Image: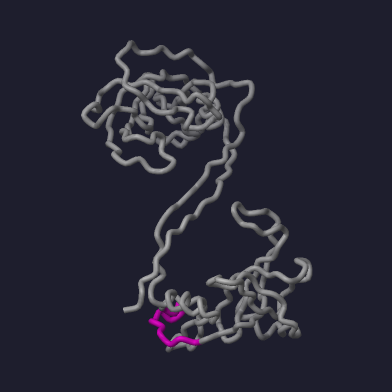
Protein backbone atom coordinates (compact mmCIF):
# COMPACT_ATOMS: atom_id res chain seq x y z
CA UNK A 1 0.00 0.00 0.00
CA UNK A 2 1.39 3.44 -0.89
CA UNK A 3 1.74 5.98 1.90
CA UNK A 4 -1.43 7.99 2.50
CA UNK A 5 -0.38 11.61 2.43
CA UNK A 6 -1.96 14.27 4.63
CA UNK A 7 -1.00 17.71 5.83
CA UNK A 8 -2.51 20.55 7.87
CA UNK A 9 -3.93 23.34 5.72
CA UNK A 10 -5.02 26.82 6.75
CA UNK A 11 -7.14 29.13 4.60
CA UNK A 12 -7.14 32.62 6.11
CA UNK A 13 -8.09 36.06 4.83
CA UNK A 14 -9.51 39.37 6.14
CA UNK A 15 -13.13 40.00 5.12
CA UNK A 16 -13.89 43.70 4.74
CA UNK A 17 -17.46 44.96 4.55
CA UNK A 18 -19.27 48.29 4.83
CA UNK A 19 -22.03 48.85 7.37
CA UNK A 20 -25.53 50.12 6.78
CA UNK A 21 -27.17 52.48 9.30
CA UNK A 22 -28.58 49.70 11.50
CA UNK A 23 -25.42 47.58 11.84
CA UNK A 24 -23.34 50.74 12.18
CA UNK A 25 -25.45 51.88 15.14
CA UNK A 26 -25.41 48.41 16.75
CA UNK A 27 -21.61 48.02 16.61
CA UNK A 28 -20.92 51.63 17.51
CA UNK A 29 -23.26 51.16 20.48
CA UNK A 30 -21.25 48.18 21.70
CA UNK A 31 -18.16 50.34 21.57
CA UNK A 32 -19.99 52.82 23.81
CA UNK A 33 -21.43 50.08 26.12
CA UNK A 34 -24.92 50.45 24.71
CA UNK A 35 -26.96 47.52 23.33
CA UNK A 36 -29.37 48.49 20.58
CA UNK A 37 -32.17 46.58 18.91
CA UNK A 38 -34.53 47.52 16.12
CA UNK A 39 -38.33 47.82 16.28
CA UNK A 40 -40.36 45.82 13.77
CA UNK A 41 -43.63 46.85 12.15
CA UNK A 42 -45.59 44.72 14.67
CA UNK A 43 -43.81 46.28 17.66
CA UNK A 44 -41.25 43.59 18.48
CA UNK A 45 -37.64 44.47 19.31
CA UNK A 46 -34.99 42.39 17.56
CA UNK A 47 -31.51 41.95 19.05
CA UNK A 48 -29.19 41.72 17.20
CA UNK A 49 -30.95 44.22 14.91
CA UNK A 50 -31.62 43.56 11.24
CA UNK A 51 -32.26 45.98 8.40
CA UNK A 52 -35.46 44.39 7.09
CA UNK A 53 -38.48 42.94 8.88
CA UNK A 54 -38.20 39.12 8.71
CA UNK A 55 -42.01 38.83 8.37
CA UNK A 56 -43.02 41.74 6.13
CA UNK A 57 -39.62 42.55 4.52
CA UNK A 58 -40.23 46.22 5.38
CA UNK A 59 -37.17 48.38 5.89
CA UNK A 60 -36.43 48.90 9.60
CA UNK A 61 -34.77 52.00 11.02
CA UNK A 62 -36.26 52.60 14.53
CA UNK A 63 -33.47 51.78 16.97
CA UNK A 64 -34.28 50.90 20.59
CA UNK A 65 -31.89 50.55 23.51
CA UNK A 66 -32.29 47.36 25.57
CA UNK A 67 -30.82 46.42 28.93
CA UNK A 68 -27.44 44.72 29.41
CA UNK A 69 -29.20 42.15 31.62
CA UNK A 70 -31.28 39.23 30.43
CA UNK A 71 -32.41 35.61 30.68
CA UNK A 72 -30.82 32.45 29.27
CA UNK A 73 -33.29 30.75 26.93
CA UNK A 74 -31.07 27.78 26.00
CA UNK A 75 -27.42 26.75 26.32
CA UNK A 76 -24.71 24.21 25.51
CA UNK A 77 -21.49 23.54 27.42
CA UNK A 78 -18.16 23.98 25.60
CA UNK A 79 -15.63 21.86 27.48
CA UNK A 80 -12.71 22.53 25.09
CA UNK A 81 -12.53 26.12 23.76
CA UNK A 82 -10.90 26.56 20.38
CA UNK A 83 -8.61 29.23 18.99
CA UNK A 84 -10.37 32.57 18.63
CA UNK A 85 -13.34 31.75 20.86
CA UNK A 86 -14.42 34.29 23.51
CA UNK A 87 -12.91 32.49 26.53
CA UNK A 88 -9.88 30.25 26.95
CA UNK A 89 -11.42 28.20 29.79
CA UNK A 90 -14.53 25.97 29.46
CA UNK A 91 -17.71 28.02 29.11
CA UNK A 92 -21.32 27.82 27.96
CA UNK A 93 -22.68 28.98 24.65
CA UNK A 94 -25.96 30.70 25.55
CA UNK A 95 -28.89 32.37 23.86
CA UNK A 96 -29.81 35.38 26.00
CA UNK A 97 -33.01 37.39 25.65
CA UNK A 98 -31.98 40.78 26.96
CA UNK A 99 -34.52 42.73 28.98
CA UNK A 100 -36.57 44.71 26.49
CA UNK A 101 -35.81 42.40 23.56
CA UNK A 102 -38.05 39.80 21.92
CA UNK A 103 -35.25 37.70 20.39
CA UNK A 104 -32.12 36.12 21.84
CA UNK A 105 -28.46 37.01 21.34
CA UNK A 106 -25.82 34.26 21.05
CA UNK A 107 -22.67 34.68 23.12
CA UNK A 108 -20.49 33.02 25.76
CA UNK A 109 -21.35 32.68 29.45
CA UNK A 110 -18.49 32.55 31.95
CA UNK A 111 -19.54 29.92 34.50
CA UNK A 112 -17.54 27.62 36.82
CA UNK A 113 -19.06 24.49 35.30
CA UNK A 114 -22.00 23.02 33.43
CA UNK A 115 -23.83 22.43 36.74
CA UNK A 116 -23.92 26.20 37.27
CA UNK A 117 -25.82 26.87 34.03
CA UNK A 118 -29.56 26.50 33.56
CA UNK A 119 -32.29 27.74 31.27
CA UNK A 120 -33.98 30.72 32.89
CA UNK A 121 -30.91 31.94 34.80
CA UNK A 122 -30.29 35.67 34.93
CA UNK A 123 -27.13 37.09 33.37
CA UNK A 124 -25.57 40.41 32.44
CA UNK A 125 -23.07 41.68 29.91
CA UNK A 126 -19.40 41.77 30.89
CA UNK A 127 -17.85 44.48 28.75
CA UNK A 128 -14.37 44.14 27.27
CA UNK A 129 -11.78 46.49 28.73
CA UNK A 130 -10.89 47.77 25.25
CA UNK A 131 -13.74 48.16 22.76
CA UNK A 132 -13.44 48.78 19.02
CA UNK A 133 -16.97 48.35 17.68
CA UNK A 134 -17.33 44.59 17.34
CA UNK A 135 -19.40 41.81 18.90
CA UNK A 136 -16.28 41.00 20.96
CA UNK A 137 -16.86 44.28 22.82
CA UNK A 138 -19.17 42.03 24.82
CA UNK A 139 -16.43 39.95 26.42
CA UNK A 140 -19.05 37.44 27.61
CA UNK A 141 -22.11 37.14 29.86
CA UNK A 142 -21.81 36.42 33.57
CA UNK A 143 -24.34 35.24 36.20
CA UNK A 144 -26.35 38.07 37.73
CA UNK A 145 -28.75 38.06 40.67
CA UNK A 146 -29.44 41.80 40.96
CA UNK A 147 -32.33 43.93 39.83
CA UNK A 148 -33.03 44.40 36.10
CA UNK A 149 -31.10 47.33 34.64
CA UNK A 150 -33.17 50.04 33.00
CA UNK A 151 -31.99 51.01 29.50
CA UNK A 152 -31.09 54.67 29.04
CA UNK A 153 -33.29 55.34 26.00
CA UNK A 154 -30.43 55.86 23.53
CA UNK A 155 -31.67 56.68 20.01
CA UNK A 156 -28.70 55.16 18.17
CA UNK A 157 -27.21 58.49 17.05
CA UNK A 158 -23.45 58.67 17.67
CA UNK A 159 -20.94 61.41 16.98
CA UNK A 160 -18.37 59.10 15.38
CA UNK A 161 -20.22 56.04 14.01
CA UNK A 162 -18.45 53.07 12.45
CA UNK A 163 -18.72 52.80 8.69
CA UNK A 164 -17.01 49.46 8.08
CA UNK A 165 -15.45 46.42 9.72
CA UNK A 166 -12.70 43.92 8.94
CA UNK A 167 -13.41 40.38 10.08
CA UNK A 168 -10.70 37.70 9.91
CA UNK A 169 -11.89 34.47 8.32
CA UNK A 170 -9.91 31.29 9.01
CA UNK A 171 -10.42 27.62 8.21
CA UNK A 172 -8.10 24.96 9.65
CA UNK A 173 -8.32 21.42 8.34
CA UNK A 174 -6.28 18.36 7.40
CA UNK A 175 -6.00 17.71 3.67
CA UNK A 176 -5.47 14.23 2.19
CA UNK A 177 -4.80 14.31 -1.56
CA UNK A 178 -5.91 10.78 -2.54
CA UNK A 179 -4.33 8.36 -5.03
CA UNK A 180 -4.05 10.58 -8.12
CA UNK A 181 -2.70 13.66 -6.40
CA UNK A 182 -0.40 11.61 -4.17
CA UNK A 183 1.25 10.25 -7.33
CA UNK A 184 1.46 13.81 -8.67
CA UNK A 185 3.14 15.05 -5.46
CA UNK A 186 5.57 12.11 -5.39
CA UNK A 187 6.60 12.88 -8.99
CA UNK A 188 7.17 16.54 -8.12
CA UNK A 189 9.63 15.42 -5.44
CA UNK A 190 11.70 13.94 -8.31
CA UNK A 191 11.22 17.14 -10.37
CA UNK A 192 8.81 15.43 -12.75
CA UNK A 193 5.30 16.58 -13.59
CA UNK A 194 2.73 13.87 -14.31
CA UNK A 195 -0.92 13.96 -15.27
CA UNK A 196 -3.53 11.31 -16.05
CA UNK A 197 -5.10 10.53 -19.41
CA UNK A 198 -8.82 9.98 -19.80
CA UNK A 199 -9.48 6.59 -21.47
CA UNK A 200 -12.46 8.08 -23.31
CA UNK A 201 -11.61 11.58 -24.61
CA UNK A 202 -7.80 11.02 -24.31
CA UNK A 203 -7.25 14.40 -22.64
CA UNK A 204 -4.40 14.68 -20.13
CA UNK A 205 -5.22 16.49 -16.90
CA UNK A 206 -2.61 18.17 -14.67
CA UNK A 207 -2.87 18.10 -11.71
CA UNK A 208 -4.80 14.81 -11.92
CA UNK A 209 -8.01 14.34 -9.94
CA UNK A 210 -8.56 10.61 -10.53
CA UNK A 211 -11.47 11.20 -12.91
CA UNK A 212 -12.12 13.07 -16.16
CA UNK A 213 -14.21 16.21 -15.48
CA UNK A 214 -15.66 16.03 -19.00
CA UNK A 215 -16.47 12.32 -19.37
CA UNK A 216 -16.91 11.44 -15.70
CA UNK A 217 -14.84 8.25 -16.00
CA UNK A 218 -11.94 7.16 -13.79
CA UNK A 219 -8.40 7.94 -14.95
CA UNK A 220 -5.36 5.81 -14.16
CA UNK A 221 -2.89 6.10 -17.07
CA UNK A 222 -0.05 8.36 -15.98
CA UNK A 223 1.51 10.71 -18.55
CA UNK A 224 4.60 12.83 -17.97
CA UNK A 225 4.15 16.38 -19.29
CA UNK A 226 6.25 19.51 -19.68
CA UNK A 227 8.44 20.61 -18.16
CA UNK A 228 8.05 23.58 -20.51
CA UNK A 229 4.77 25.23 -21.30
CA UNK A 230 2.92 28.26 -22.66
CA UNK A 231 1.35 31.19 -20.82
CA UNK A 232 -2.32 31.24 -21.80
CA UNK A 233 -3.65 34.03 -19.56
CA UNK A 234 -2.18 36.01 -16.66
CA UNK A 235 -2.78 38.76 -14.13
CA UNK A 236 -0.52 41.32 -12.48
CA UNK A 237 -0.66 41.20 -8.66
CA UNK A 238 -0.28 44.61 -7.01
CA UNK A 239 -1.33 43.83 -3.43
CA UNK A 240 1.16 42.04 -1.21
CA UNK A 241 -0.27 38.93 0.43
CA UNK A 242 0.24 38.24 4.12
CA UNK A 243 3.11 35.82 4.86
CA UNK A 244 4.16 35.73 1.18
CA UNK A 245 7.69 37.03 0.70
CA UNK A 246 7.30 38.20 -2.90
CA UNK A 247 7.66 41.83 -3.88
CA UNK A 248 4.82 43.37 -5.87
CA UNK A 249 4.04 43.75 -8.66
CA UNK A 250 4.44 40.19 -9.91
CA UNK A 251 2.64 38.01 -12.44
CA UNK A 252 0.47 34.97 -11.79
CA UNK A 253 -0.37 32.98 -14.90
CA UNK A 254 -2.17 29.97 -16.30
CA UNK A 255 0.41 27.75 -17.99
CA UNK A 256 -0.41 24.98 -20.45
CA UNK A 257 2.40 22.48 -20.02
CA UNK A 258 3.47 20.63 -23.16
CA UNK A 259 1.35 17.50 -23.46
CA UNK A 260 -1.35 18.66 -21.01
CA UNK A 261 -4.95 19.56 -21.84
CA UNK A 262 -5.53 21.69 -18.74
CA UNK A 263 -3.60 24.81 -17.73
CA UNK A 264 -2.22 25.06 -14.20
CA UNK A 265 -1.39 28.29 -12.41
CA UNK A 266 2.03 29.49 -11.27
CA UNK A 267 4.10 32.63 -10.75
CA UNK A 268 6.20 34.04 -13.59
CA UNK A 269 9.69 35.34 -12.77
CA UNK A 270 12.91 36.21 -14.55
CA UNK A 271 11.21 38.84 -16.72
CA UNK A 272 9.75 42.32 -16.01
CA UNK A 273 6.06 42.03 -15.20
CA UNK A 274 5.09 44.29 -18.10
CA UNK A 275 6.80 42.00 -20.63
CA UNK A 276 4.78 38.88 -19.76
CA UNK A 277 2.36 38.04 -22.56
CA UNK A 278 0.01 35.37 -23.83
CA UNK A 279 1.93 32.74 -25.77
CA UNK A 280 5.16 33.27 -23.81
CA UNK A 281 7.11 30.01 -23.59
CA UNK A 282 8.30 29.24 -20.04
CA UNK A 283 10.17 26.59 -18.04
CA UNK A 284 10.11 25.71 -14.31
CA UNK A 285 12.66 26.96 -11.77
CA UNK A 286 13.23 24.65 -8.82
CA UNK A 287 14.82 25.60 -5.52
CA UNK A 288 16.86 23.26 -3.35
CA UNK A 289 14.66 20.94 -1.30
CA UNK A 290 11.40 22.24 -2.78
CA UNK A 291 8.62 19.82 -3.74
CA UNK A 292 7.23 22.01 -6.50
CA UNK A 293 8.60 24.65 -8.90
CA UNK A 294 9.22 28.00 -7.23
CA UNK A 295 8.21 29.84 -10.41
CA UNK A 296 8.40 29.71 -14.21
CA UNK A 297 10.75 31.81 -16.35
CA UNK A 298 11.05 32.47 -20.10
CA UNK A 299 12.58 29.49 -21.89
CA UNK A 300 14.04 31.56 -24.74
CA UNK A 301 11.86 29.90 -27.37
CA UNK A 302 9.70 31.86 -29.82
CA UNK A 303 6.17 32.61 -28.60
CA UNK A 304 3.62 29.88 -29.25
CA UNK A 305 1.02 30.59 -31.98
CA UNK A 306 -2.40 31.46 -30.60
CA UNK A 307 -4.05 28.46 -32.29
CA UNK A 308 -1.89 26.07 -30.23
CA UNK A 309 -3.33 27.18 -26.89
CA UNK A 310 -6.65 28.94 -27.63
CA UNK A 311 -8.66 25.90 -26.44
CA UNK A 312 -7.00 26.17 -23.02
CA UNK A 313 -7.93 29.78 -22.28
Rendered residue at 53%/72% (across/down): 291
The x and y percentages for residue 112 are: 28, 27
The x and y percentages for residue 68 are: 41, 20
Quarter of the image with the N terminus is: bottom left
State left or right for residue 306 relative to residue 141: right
The x and y percentages for residue 59 are: 51, 33
Which residue in the rendered view is the most extreme toward the front?
288
State left or right for residue 238 relative to residue 183: right
Closest to the observer, 290 or 200: 290
Rendering quarter of residue 308: bottom right
Rendering quarter of residue 249: bottom right
User: Within the magenta stretch, is there residue 217?
Assistant: yes
Tally of marks: 0
Rendered residue at 45%/27% (across/down): 138
Rendered residue at 40%/22% (across/down): 125
Rendering quarter of residue 94: top left
Closest to the observer, 11 or 270: 270
Magenta highlight range: 211-223
The x and y percentages for residue 184 are: 47, 77
State left or right for residue 28 relative to residue 65: right
Q: Taking 276 as reference, is 89 above or below it?
A: above
What secondary structure is the magenta-colored segment mainly? loop
Q: Taking 302 as reference, is 159 above or below it?
A: above
User: Within the magenta stretch, is there residue 159?
Assistant: no
Colour scheme in use: one colour
Rendered residue at 47%/32% (across/down): 136
Amino acid sequence: MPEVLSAPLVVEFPFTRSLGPVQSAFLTGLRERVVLGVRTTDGRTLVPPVEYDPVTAAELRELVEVAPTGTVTTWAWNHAPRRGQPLTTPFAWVLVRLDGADTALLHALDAPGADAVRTGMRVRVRWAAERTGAITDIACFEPYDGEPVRPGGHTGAFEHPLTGIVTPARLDYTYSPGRAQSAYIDALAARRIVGERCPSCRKVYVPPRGACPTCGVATAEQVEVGPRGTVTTFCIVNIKAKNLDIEVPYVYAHIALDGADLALHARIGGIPYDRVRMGLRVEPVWTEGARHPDHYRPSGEPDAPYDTYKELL
